[in-house]
Image (cartoon, grey):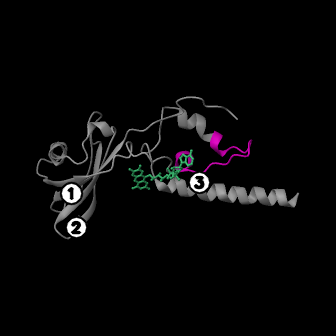
Amino acid sequence: MRRYTSGFVRRSRYAQIWIKIAGHHSMIAYAPTGNPIALVRSEYFLDDDTTILVGFGPDHTAIDLDDRVSVQELVRRWRPDLEVLETAGHDWNADPWSGQTWASPRSGQFVEGWSVFHGRETRLRFAGADWAKGWNGVVVDGAIETGITTARGLIDEFREVSQR
Ligand SMILES: Cc1cc2nc3c(=O)[nH]c(=O)nc-3n(C[C@H](O)[C@H](O)[C@H](O)COP(=O)(O)OP(=O)(O)OC[C@H]3O[C@@H](n4cnc5c(N)ncnc54)[C@H](O)[C@@H]3O)c2cc1C
């Protein structure tokens, strides 16, 4: 098995923010590098004629998740007509139980390291979103996929052993 001693997956610094705006607005918007919110999209339309947007940014230190005024300025870069009523978020990077958000391998690291986690050379078996075959890293689908495939693989291995 190959050894990866340092910097295999760098610690992520991402931010996720929830933004309540006045009115019902269906939108999805991206911003170029350097913007504290890189992607924002409508998530829920509430009965009180407001919309909850979810936003994602590359650096949790570049955005104050609870500062309505600065978030209003960021939202205006896309849509000057939108009024931000409230914002909220959790700093997953500062949370001692998570320590970061989702994995962000450097260029080439996923391709180079991915097969290592699927090998059967040792007794270690891995399941987790970061080395899934589909939707790896950022969504729970990858965690479910590897949970299923790793569990099935183990059942097959135990069957093989018991039939010897
Ligand atoms: C802010 C945020 C928003 C997200 N939003 C979405 C979304 O809307 N939709 C979606 O599909 N996905 C979303 N995701 C991604 C999704 O949460 C992950 O892809 C999924 O939870 C990964 O599951 P996992 O089992 O691979 O890892 P995890 O859920 O990270 O589980 C790993 C576990 O291992 C534990 N652990 C770590 N080290 C050790 C150790 N040394 N010893 C013992 N235990 C250890 C950790 O405490 C953790 O409980 C989001 C993630 C974040 C951070």
Which residue occupies the extreme bottom position in the image? 47
Q: Name the dominant secondary structure of the magenta segment.
A: loop
Disc 1 crowd, CA 10 A, few/some/many (<14, 14-19, 20+): many
Residues at marks 3 and 2 touching, judged by CB atoms closer than 8 Å: no
Q: Could you tell which of marks 1 and 2 lies nearer the N-terminus? A: 1
- Label at residue 146: 3
Residue identified by numbered label 2: 46
- Label at residue 53: none
Q: Could you tell which of marks 3 and 2 lies nearer the N-terminus? A: 2
**Horizontal and vertical percent position of residue 103:** 47, 42
Q: Could you tell which of marks 1 and 3 lies nearer the N-terminus? A: 1
Tell me what residue is drawn at x 16 percent, y 47 percent: 72
Q: In the figure, 4 relative to 49: above or below?
A: above
Question: Is the C-beta of the residue carrying label 3 under 8 Å from the nearest atom of ligand 1?
Answer: yes
Residue identified by numbered label 1: 20
Find out whether residue 127 is within the magenta segment.
yes
Give the magenta-colored segment's residue range.
Answer: 116-133
Cα distance between the residues tagged 3 and 2:
35 Å
Residues at marks 1 and 3 touching, judged by CB atoms closer than 8 Å: no
**Horizontal and vertical percent position of residue 5:** 60, 29
Under mark 3, the amino acid is: Thr
Secondary structure of residue under mark 2 = strand
Secondary structure of residue under mark 1 = strand
Quadrant of the rendered structure where residue 52 is? bottom left
Which quadrant of the rendered structure holds the C terminus? bottom right
Left of 109 or right of it: where is 23? left
